């Protein structure tokens, strides 16, 4: 049997989670209220994932390495955090892909989609191979919109790289690589173990304190 030095997925995920703990983006053993009012002891603050350039570059390296054997012409993202990460992925990938970003837009009917600046369209003239990069996958809707955009421009999606997939229910037709694949448990306020223990709610992260007023 050939010897392997590969680290198993669970260990790797623990290391990646450690990196995110270090940036302050991943908070554990605390008490948060999520936007849909469920309670949890863990939280990922998207905005803090990319605040330390050396760590962002490290995360970008890991994603680029995973897709190193795949030809990538374009790395595509949307949003500030994902774009900083996407830049790092593009820089580390051996194909030396271009890096571009789409812009999120709310349509008049209230639904969201993404649009690409006209100046970037020329990169798709000869059918670009596209790696989509996202920071945190919460619903997967943004990535789905990016996939649609790539197809509309005649490109081909070769993979999706993300830092954190919040739910294993989020799936795509294309190879997905995520640094952390952790779905943390949430509780209704009446069954929340942190509430029972009297642990104060963290008002800095999660659902904002002012929105909470008058809810009790
Ligand atoms: Zn609680």
Image: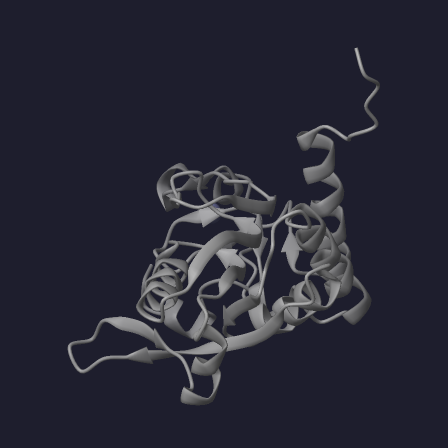
Q: Residue at x 38, y 39 (%)?
A: 169
Quadrant where the N terminus lies? top right
In screen coordinates, is 155 left or right of 22? left
- From this view, report whether residue 123 is shown above or below residue 23: below
Quadrant where the C terminus lies? bottom left
Q: Residue furthest front?
A: 126
Q: Position of residue 57 (x, y in %)?
A: 76, 64
Residue 156, quarter of the rendered image: bottom left
Exactly how many numbered labels are in the figure? 0
In this view, the residue in front, 93 or 13, is 93
- From this view, report whether residue 179 is shown above or below residue 114: above
State how the image is colored: one colour
Q: Position of residue 14 (x, y in %)?
A: 71, 38
Q: Position of residue 157 (x, y in %)?
A: 45, 56
Q: Position of residue 52 (x, y in %)?
A: 77, 69
In screen coordinates, is 212 left or right of 1? left
In screen coordinates, is 166 left or right of 53? left
């Amino acid at each position: 049997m050939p010897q392997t030095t590969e680290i198993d997925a669970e260990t790797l995920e623990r290391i990646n989670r450690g990196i995110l703990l270090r940036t302050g983006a991943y908070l554990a053993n605390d008490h948060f209220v999520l936007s849909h009012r469920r309670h949890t002891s863990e939280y990922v603050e998207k905005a803090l994932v990319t605040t330390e350039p050396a760590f962002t570059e490290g995360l970008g390296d890991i994603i680029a390495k995973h897709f190193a054997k795949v030809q990538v012409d374009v790395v595509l993202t949307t949003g500030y955090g994902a774009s900083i990460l996407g830049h790092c992925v593009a820089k580390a990938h051996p194909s030396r892909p271009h890096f571009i970003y789409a812009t999120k837009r709310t349509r008049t009917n209230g639904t969201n989609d993404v649009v690409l600046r006209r100046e970037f369209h020329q990169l798709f003239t000869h059918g670009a191979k596209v790696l989509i990069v996202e920071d945190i996958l919460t619903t997967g809707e943004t990535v789905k919109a990016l996939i649609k955009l790539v197809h509309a421009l005649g490109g081909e999606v070769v993979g999706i790289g993300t830092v954190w997939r919040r739910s294993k229910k989020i799936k795509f037709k294309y190879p997905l690589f995520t640094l952390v694949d952790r779905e943390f448990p949430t509780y209704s306020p009446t069954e929340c173990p942190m509430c029972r223990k009297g642990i104060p709610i963290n008002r800095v992260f999660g659902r904002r304190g002012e929105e909470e007023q008058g809810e009790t």
